[in-house]
Image: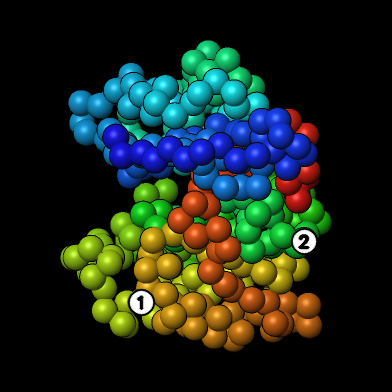
Amino acid sequence: VPRTRQARPQGRYGAGPVEVALAVDVGGTKLAVARVGADGGVLDRAVAPTPTGADDGPEEVWGALRRLVEGVSIGDEAVCGVGCGGPMAKGGEMVSPLNIGGWRGFPLRARLAELTGLPVAVDNDAKALAVGEAWQGGARGRADFLAMVVSTGVGGGIVLDGRLLDGAGGNAGHIGHVIVEPGGRVCACGALGCLEAEASGTGIAAATGRPAAEAGPEVRARTGRLVGRAVASVANLLDLPLALVAGSVALGYGEVFFAEAQAELDRSARLGFSRGAAIQPAGLGPDGPLVGAAAVGWRALGHDVGVR
Ligand SMILES: [Zn+2]
């Protein structure tokens, strides 16, 4: 297990220990655990592949996560915050990440609470990213924005009027299932032409027959256009002026992706209030998921993380 350990920083209120969160990021490709400081700095971390083989049941996945937690936590953390792929039952009591077949209705929050003895808060990973961007990233001081991830899948979290939107089941913000191509590719959800079916790494690989990272300029530009189209609908629907985008596909495609996304957003968000909406790379970079997970924990404890 690759990991780094750094000296503990001084507390910002004196020489005592800083408040540290234990951050857990559960994704379909990898599991990551870190200690995150009060300023959003990642202190110690460990990463391992997510067990997703046909024989990997709930305890195999849990065992891999437990080993990471035991390797990183030193017992002084104030809270454990978790970002996990959706869907989930509200509060993360039961998680069923689409890309982790071994977990269907897995009691993640209770297991982590038992293991760590800490208060544990679980939220959708893209909603966690939104909280992290408000706390320490590109949305500091912003009350209305969308944070989204375009990687293996496509996810999103929405902050409106300074409040993180939950929805009836806690699943608000699933921008990956906005239709961007009527009659398009079949999505994992069963609908046709969802953003996730057309613009996720999985969708691009299925359409082109090679890994998304190897896509040519036309595919990169089209992916940006489709993301911009979905964001335009959200901007018009919610009077929302800013979208921050993370994830290996978006960040890997880079300049051409963001230029095309912005151009499509400019073409399609034309109401007085939605004109000028911006789409930009997320501010936290590769640490976003872990910083977001920590922010989920602090928010649950009632600390000010920039969103209610
Ligand atoms: Zn869908």
Q: Quadrant of the N terminus?
A: top left
Q: Which residue is mark 2?
A: 141
Residue 298 placed where, x, y %?
A: 69, 36
- View extreme (front): residue: 15
- The residue lying at 49 percent from left, 26 percent from top is 73
Of 70 and 307, nearer the camera is 70
Q: Residue at x 44, y 80 (%)?
A: 255
Q: Which mark is residue 286?
A: none
* Residue in the foreground of this view, choosing between 89 and 112: 112
| Structural distance between the alpha carbons of marks 1 and 2 | 31 Å
Relative to 210, does residue 58 appear above or below in the rendering?
A: above
Mark 2: few, some, or many residues within 10 Å (few <14, many ≥20)? Answer: some
Evaluate whether residue 239 shows in this view: yes
> Does label 2 point to a residue whose CB lies under 8 Å from ligand 1?
no
Residue 99 visible in this rendered orientation of the protein: no
Label annotation for residue 220:
1
The image shows residue 5 at horizontal and vertical percentages of 43, 38
- Please state the total of marks drawn on the protein image: 2
Identify which amino acid the numbered label 1 is placed on. Arg
Q: Amino acid at mark 2?
A: Gly
**Rendering coords of residue 38 (x, y %):** 66, 42
Asked whether the beta carbons under mark 1 and mark 2 sit within 8 Å of each other, the answer is no
- Could you tell which of marks 1 and 2 lies nearer the N-terminus? 2
The image shows residue 35, relative to residue 119, as above or below, that is below
Disc 1 is placed on an element classified as: helix
Q: Label 2, secondary structure: give it.
A: loop
State left or right for residue 125 relative to residue 47. Answer: right
Q: Nearer the viewer, mark 1 or mark 2?
A: 2
**Which residue: 49% across, 52% down?**
287
Residue 221 as seen in the image, left or right of residue 214? right
